[in-house]
Image (tube, rainbow, N blue to C red):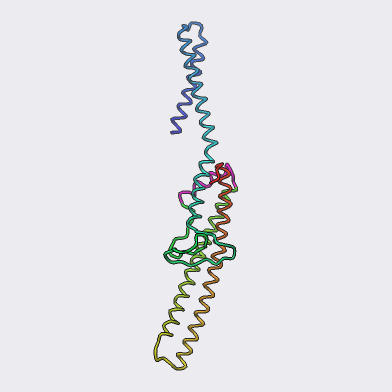
């Protein structure tokens, strides 16, 4: 495509030169001179129009790139869910989210944590022409999303330990006719394990909430930068 456009431009340029030479010949008939003048004008107009399109495309390109990147920001924000309030511990969900307020932060254990799509990664450097800081923000977001994924895994592991500890205690408490020192010691140990698992789960949820808000903060910065380039308020 570029080769064809280049050949066209070169051809138009040569046409102008040849027509100009033709117009300078003293023996050239008047009708040929008139035709050559028209053709020269048309060739010049084509070149001017092509140059104008190229300038327009060059100016429009950063806005197009910013628009694509803005859609990626919106997608990631939607998959992360609400950021929650400051110091809010997110809920842990493994399935249906019905009844959860839309502004409540959650850790979805049944969903894959979002990351920057591989299709978008090659596009990011192209925005540097308009605002190089946006490239740095995407690098920051990439690290934050990796850390968010790690925090989700921490919550998943802590939740599994907590579930196992509670199941063990429930099993001991449901036994009928059991008595003796060993049984009492086993119950006490199971209760201690439940308490320890609950503390670890709450700690994992807390650090996950902090990382979730950090991801949203970086998304806010990206949204502001990209909408400034696009000239929109999306």
**Nearer to me, 133 or 167:** 167
In the rendered image, residue 76, in percent from the top left (x then y), is placed at 49, 54
**Nearer to me, 5 or 227:** 227
Residue 136, compared with residue 12, is above or below; it is below
Residue at the spot x=48%, y=25% of the render? Answer: 10
Q: Is residue 119 magenta?
A: yes
**Nearer to me, 61 or 43:** 61
Q: How many labels does the image show?
A: 0
Q: Give the range drawn in magenta.
A: 118-132
Residue 19, compared with residue 78, is above or below; it is above
In the rendered image, residue 132, in percent from the top left (x then y), is placed at 59, 46
Residue at the spot x=51%, y=43% of the render? Answer: 65
Residue extending farthest bottom: 180
Residue 186, compared with residue 64, is above or below; it is below
Residue at the spot x=48%, y=63% of the render? Answer: 100
In the rendered image, residue 152, in percent from the top left (x then y), is placed at 49, 65
Q: Quadrant of residue 86?
A: bottom right
Q: Is residue 23 magenta?
A: no
Residue 155, compared with residue 146, is above or below; it is below
Which quadrant: the N terminus?
top left
Residue extending farthest left: 176
């Amino acid at each position: 495509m570029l080769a064809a456009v280049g050949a066209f431009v070169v051809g138009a340029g040569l046409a102008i030169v040849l027509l100009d030479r033709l117009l300078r010949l003293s023996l050239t008939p008047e009708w040929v001179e008139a035709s050559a003048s028209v053709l020269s004008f048309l060739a010049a107009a084509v070149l001017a129009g092509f140059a104008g399109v190229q300038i327009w495309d060059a100016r429009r390109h950063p806005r197009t790139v910013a628009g694509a990147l803005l859609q990626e920001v919106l997608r990631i924000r939607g998959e992360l869910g609400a950021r929650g309030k400051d110091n809010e511990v997110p809920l842990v969900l493994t399935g249906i989210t019905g009844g959860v307020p839309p502004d409540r932060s959650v850790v979805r254990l049944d969903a894959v944590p979002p990351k920057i799509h591989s299709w978008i990664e090659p596009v990011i450097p192209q925005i540097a022409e308009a605002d190089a800081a946006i490239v740095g923000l995407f690098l920051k977001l990439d690290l934050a999303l990796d850390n968010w994924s790690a925090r989700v895994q921490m919550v998943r592991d802590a939740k599994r330990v907590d579930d196992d500890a509670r199941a063990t205690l429930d099993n001991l408490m449901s036994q009928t006719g059991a008595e003796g020192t060993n049984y009492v010691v086993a119950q006490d140990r199971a209760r201690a394990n439940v308490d320890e698992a609950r503390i670890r789960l709450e700690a994992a949820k807390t650090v996950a909430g902090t990382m979730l808000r950090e991801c949203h903060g970086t998304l806010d910065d990206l949204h502001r930068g990209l909408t400034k380039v696009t000239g929109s308020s999306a």
